[in-house]
């Protein structure tokens, strides 16, 4: 029987019911704070995860929450059958830590972690799953507290089975740390508690731009590596556990020394999850810059952008292929990086590339960025309206 990549199945299942739209701007900061203030200080990691789950469900509405919970009853049954067939553990030797890197570049890992752990295994979700009696007992204690929150329980079972496959392997009982990038996951605090059960450190790394978003609330890791003290204050406002933050800029942000490239492009626009109407506005301003004699390019988002729509609109603009041109090269070959909000602007800033914040494509979103505490508004920047 051919093995199914359950990580892919799970993503498609959640997207089918929950949708795949960016919900960052769907609630104001005031509305988000009102939701946050409903919750008392969590008494333990299980409650931290449950509060984060409830915050995330606020975006979905009662019908979607019901569908997620109802369908999760069957998903749990399916997954238990799946585990009984494909139950396995990862055979590794002498790895001190495992990093669930998935689609991230390896250089996003802080250098101090590479120095601390002499052997780090780079792993992907969806390869191995395992669960033992100790794990089941751990999950059952959570189920007793929240027996009707089936989607909450299902995702916990799934994530624990991934962690267990790495921690409880035959050849290596010396894993001392699990490294991930999952502050957005409501399973994160429970997984910290789970790691403690096996005397393993649970470490999180910052991997992209962060705004005030209750999706990222209440979480606790043993260590969370962030890019700037600014984010510590932001996460504390979101009621994350305070004593976990370590500031360190990873190599992925400091790329200037390794890329000596002529700046042949005057302006590069870095897309996020823009819809067709927004893309038409972006094209309008890039075309205007091009007509002024500048060399302009556009970089689609590797996950969120619809390439066919982009190619139909940006016929007279250089469209980068993220598979062929790595992000570091893209940044270092341009004189100006443009976006509404993106970690790319952070990378550009750290490498002395001019940053331009798009205040024209979606004026409502731009105006919301200040209340959402977007860090790049605090840095030296230019607005798109100032050059168009």
Image: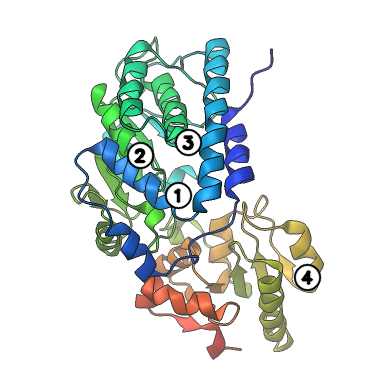
Q: Mark 3 and mark 4: span between their CA atoms?
A: 39 Å
Point 39% across, 10% down: residue: 171
| Residue corresponding to mark 2 | 188
Q: In what element is the residue under mark 2?
A: helix
Question: Can you tell which mark lies on residue 57?
Answer: 1
Question: Can you tell which mark lies on residue 192?
Answer: none
Question: Can you tell which mark lies on residue 313?
Answer: 4
* Quarter of the N terminus within the rendering: top right
Q: In what element is the residue under mark 4?
A: helix
Q: Mark 1 and mark 3: span between their CA atoms?
A: 10 Å
Mark positioned earlier in the residue sequence (2 or 3) = 3
Q: Mark 2 and mark 4: span between their CA atoms?
A: 40 Å
Count neighbours of disc 3 (C-alpha within 10 A) and say few if under 14, some if 14 to 19, many if 20 or more: many
Point 28% across, 56% down: residue: 38
Q: State which quadrant residue 116 falls in.
A: top left
Left or right, residue 242 beside residue 126: left
On screen, residue 253 above or below 14: below
| Residue corresponding to mark 3 | 151
Q: Mark 4 and mark 1: span between their CA atoms?
A: 35 Å
């Amino acid at each position: 029987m051919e093995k199914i990549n359950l990580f892919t199945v799970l993503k498609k299942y959640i997207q089918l019911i929950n949708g795949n739209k960016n919900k960052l701007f769907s609630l104001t900061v005031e509305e988000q704070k009102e939701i946050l203030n409903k919750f008392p200080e969590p008494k333990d990691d299980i409650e931290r995860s449950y509060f984060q789950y409830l915050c995330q469900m606020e975006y979905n509405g009662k019908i979607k929450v019901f569908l997620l919970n109802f369908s999760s009853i069957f998903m749990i049954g399916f997954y238990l059958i799946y585990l009984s067939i494909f139950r396995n553990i990862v055979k590794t030797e002498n790895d001190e830590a495992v990093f669930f890197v998935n689609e991230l570049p390896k250089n996003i890992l802080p250098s101090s972690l590479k120095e601390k752990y002499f052997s780090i295994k780079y792993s992907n979700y969806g390869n191995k799953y395992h669960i033992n009696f100790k794990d089941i007992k751990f999950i059952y204690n959570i189920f007793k507290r929240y027996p009707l929150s089936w989607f909450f329980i299902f995702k916990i079972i799934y994530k624990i089975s991934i962690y267990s496959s790495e921690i409880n392997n035959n050849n290596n009982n010396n894993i001392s740390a699990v490294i991930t990038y999952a502050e957005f996951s409501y399973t994160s605090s429970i997984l910290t508690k789970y790691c403690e059960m096996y005397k393993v450190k649970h470490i999180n790394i910052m991997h992209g731009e962060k705004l005030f978003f209750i999706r990222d609330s209440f979480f606790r890791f043993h260590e969370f590596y962030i890019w700037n003290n600014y984010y510590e204050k932001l996460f504390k406002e979101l009621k994350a556990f305070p004593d976990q933050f370590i500031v360190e800029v990873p190599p992925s942000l400091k790329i200037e020394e390794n890329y000596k490239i002529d700046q042949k492009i005057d302006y590069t626009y870095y897309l996020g999850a823009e819809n067709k109407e927004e893309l038409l506005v972006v094209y309008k301003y890039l075309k205007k810059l091009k007509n002024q004699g500048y060399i302009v390019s556009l970089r689609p988002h590797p996950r969120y952008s619809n390439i066919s729509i982009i190619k139909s609109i940006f016929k007279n603009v250089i469209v980068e292929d993220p598979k062929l041109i790595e992000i570091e090269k893209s940044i270092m070959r341009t004189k100006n990086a443009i976006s509404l909000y993106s970690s790319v602007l952070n990378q550009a800033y750290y490498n002395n590339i001019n940053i331009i914040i798009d205040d024209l494509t979606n004026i409502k979103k731009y105006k919301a960025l200040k209340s959402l505490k977007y860090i790049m508004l605090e840095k030296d920047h230019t607005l798109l309206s100032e050059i168009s």
